[in-house]
Image (cartoon, rainbow, N blue to C red):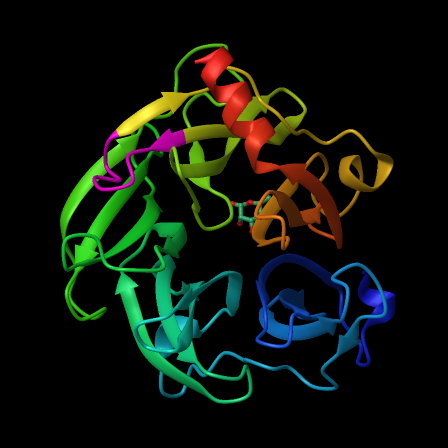
Amino acid sequence: MTAANWPYQVNSVFNPGATLLADGSTLLLCRVEDRRGLSHLCAARSVNGVDHWQVDSRPTFAPDPEHFPEELWGIEDPRITYLPELSQYAIIYVAYSRGGPCVALALTKDFHQFERYGVIMQPEDKDAALLPHRIDGRWALIHRPAGATGSHIWISYSSDLHHWGGHKQILEARLGGFWDANKIGLSPPLIETSEGWLMIYHGVRQNAAGSIYRLGLALFDLNAPEQCLKHGDEWVFAPQEPYEQRGDVDNVVFPCGYTLGADGDTLNLYYGAADTRIAMTTGSVRAMLKWLNKRS
Ligand code: BMA
């Protein structure tokens, strides 16, 4: 999808969260940047998750800076996790505040009405998603605080989704010449597999021409998700097609959501391409686990 698919005038559509709805259709919650440069979220629905997208005629979830001043400069990059315990979808999104980006939470049953919990991680923090169920009685949030000497991936825990603690760094950006040196972040929510929580993360390589956003894999213990079991050295997905290499921000592939097929293996991964448009790629969870077993 591109801005041309939108029923109202926008600059760009990218970085969508994704989920399957109860009827088996796919919902994308897309980041939509308007022509002021500020983002809101808009839902697009498709029966097969590939084409014939029905886009809401107005913003589905818009910033509300009057009641939530942290949303002053828009809301971005949603990650959706269905929480069976609450029978609700959790949307973790970036609220772009005057103090920088921070992590915010809203719950919804239907993607029409939303209950905001407000900011749950103060600036600078982003690239966050909830695990779908409690671990040892506590909800777990993966997120990426910005550090002065590098940006790494962390986990935090909460018993009520409001108050967070038990903060631990779980994946450190590498150094030097690596494709993921200095700055990494969670991409879509973790994928629960029999071997552990599979993480697709982005690594940012800064070079003289700008930066390149590519994807890598890591695996975490199912019962203790702060424990990294495997971490692949090489990237697995990178900007390659013209629509990924050229746009408002060149050389970016940035997934915020996936859906899992009925076979429990085929992943539809939805991503922003060059901060301009929405693309999809498929993958196999089994193949990713196999790759990690060989390469880490
Ligand atoms: C990251 C996020 C994403 C964006 C990417 C590339 O820091 O802000 O929203 O897609 O940069 O510009």
Q: Position of residue 271 (x, y in %)?
A: 66, 49
Q: Is residue 193 magenta?
A: no
Residue 173 found in image quarter:
top left
Find the residue positioned furthest to the front: 263
Q: Position of residue 218 (x, y in %)?
A: 42, 29
Measuring 64% from the left and 53% from the top, which residue is drawn there? 261
Which quadrant holds the N terminus?
bottom right
Q: Position of residue 47 (x, y in %)?
A: 76, 71
Q: Quadrant of residue 36?
A: bottom right
- Identify the image quadrant of the C terminus: top left
In this view, 182 is above or below 185: above
Instruction: Answer left or right for 145 relative to 177.
Output: left
Q: Which residues are magenta?
A: 219-227
47 sits to left or right of 21 = right
Say which residue appears at 22% left-offset and 42% top-offset. 223
Which of the two residues, 222 or 15, is positioned nearer the viewer here?
A: 222
Comparing 123 with 16, the one in front is 16
* Count of numbered marks: 0
283 relative to 272, above or below: above
x 81%, y 74%: residue: 6
Residue 291 point in image, percent of width and height: 55, 20
Assign the magenta stretch its main secondary structure.
loop
| Residue 222 is inside the magenta segment | yes
Nearest to the observer: residue 135 or residue 208: 135
- Report the front residue among 39 and 240: 240
